[in-house]
Amino acid sequence: MSRPGELQEVALWRVRLPLRTPLRSGHGTEAHRDLILVAVRAADGTVGWGECSALARPTYTGEFTAAAWLVLRDELAPRVLAGEDLDVVGHPMALAAVRGAVRDADLRRAGRSLTDAVAARLGRPRAAVPHTAVVGRMAVDDLLAAVDARVRAGARLVKLKATPRRDDLDAVAAVRATWPTLALAVDGNGTLDGRAVATLDTLDLTYLEQPVPADDLVGSAELARRCATPIALDESVTSVTALETASALGAGAIVNVKPARLGGVDPAVAVVQRAADVGWPVFVGGLLETGVGRATALALAASSACLLPTDLGPSAAYFAADLTAPIVGDDDGLVVVPTGPGIGVAPDPDRLAAAAVDHVVVTPAAGTAP
Ligand code: MG
């Protein structure tokens, strides 16, 4: 990953950015994005960027921002500076940030894009990709307006967050009734029950994502046998091994691949390759990333191995002003994949400073400095 003395410092920024629209899902509500950016500075001055996309609270997975800050500051930054293995257990999003920053620096130095590096393993990339509008739980009238706006902006698929509550299921049915041919999906974030799944199964969904808790693969397999709707797994797939187990049990048919959840782009590539072996279509999911995490994940989404629409929409769907140059859509509503060296974007220093609520620089000699 890095050799001793190769890196001069690891800088951490904890940032807080308001979301344009709070995202309500089965695991809680995000109104702000509270996450960590990592910058590594190499001895030759090259800087690489990574993002820890953990949520503020341990609701999606066990990782959360305050804990990730400690893991990054006290474990991963000193180890990467010393050229040691980054062998922490249970913190894939923090790990992905450091791995991503080191990879970004290496690629920038080589003048090569992450998209091309991924394509070397997964096949020719696309310049722009179709995206899914992920729309949170809200009152029916608001939901119909939100879906209408995102479809007009070019989303090719709409994914609604839902719980077994009657109003959520009625809202999904209202969207289906309004757009009978819209490509529509639902994400239960592990909260659904058999009755809710049976109702949703009548709505001609493209897929039903993570209906039951992450560790309930047997339960997911039972639903998959009863449902005509393909089951997509997100939280359940934490590794290649987890994917193989899910596949062996028949617990799903589609996988949501997020580099952050899997510990970085390289483990994510391995999951995409294994998914092809077991015949599961892939889409690249999102975690309300800023431009740094969004560009990183888009390098994977650009691959022709990830053909379902990605959850990574344009920056403007999430933030009034992203920390980097915004990720944008083209005239057809496709999301344009950054092409510059490394991840192709970097934070604007002034916007980063304005959004930062904590900052620390870890160096080999001095340890941690505020
Ligand atoms: Mg999901």
Image: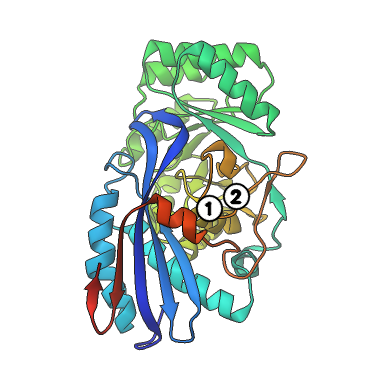
Q: Quadrant of residue 264?
A: bottom left
Q: Position of residue 183 (x, y in %)?
A: 64, 28
Mark 2 CB within 8 Å of ligand 1: no
List the residue tagged with mark 2.
326
Residue lying at 53% horizontally and 53% vertically, measured from the top left? 291
User: Image height check: is 288 above or below 90?
Assistant: above
In the rendered structure, which amino acid carries the disc numbered 2?
A: Pro
In the rendered structure, which amino acid carries the disc numbered 1?
A: Gly
Q: Residue furthest bottom?
A: 5
Q: Residues within 10 Å of mark 1 (few under 14, many from 20)?
A: many
All told, the count of numbered labels is 2
Residue 56 seen by the camera = yes
Residue lying at 63% horizontally and 25% vertically, measured from the top left? 149
List the residue tagged with mark 1.
291
| Residues at marks 1 and 2, CA–CA distance in whole angstroms | 6 Å
Mark 1 element type:
helix
> Which of these two is toward me, 203 or 319?
319
Q: Quadrant of the C terminus?
A: bottom left
Q: Quadrant of residue 267?
A: bottom left
User: Image height check: is 228 above or below 215?
Assistant: above
Disc with the residue nearer the chain's start (1 vs 2): 1
Residue lying at 22% horizontally and 68% vertically, measured from the top left? 74
Identify the disc placed on residue 106.
Answer: none
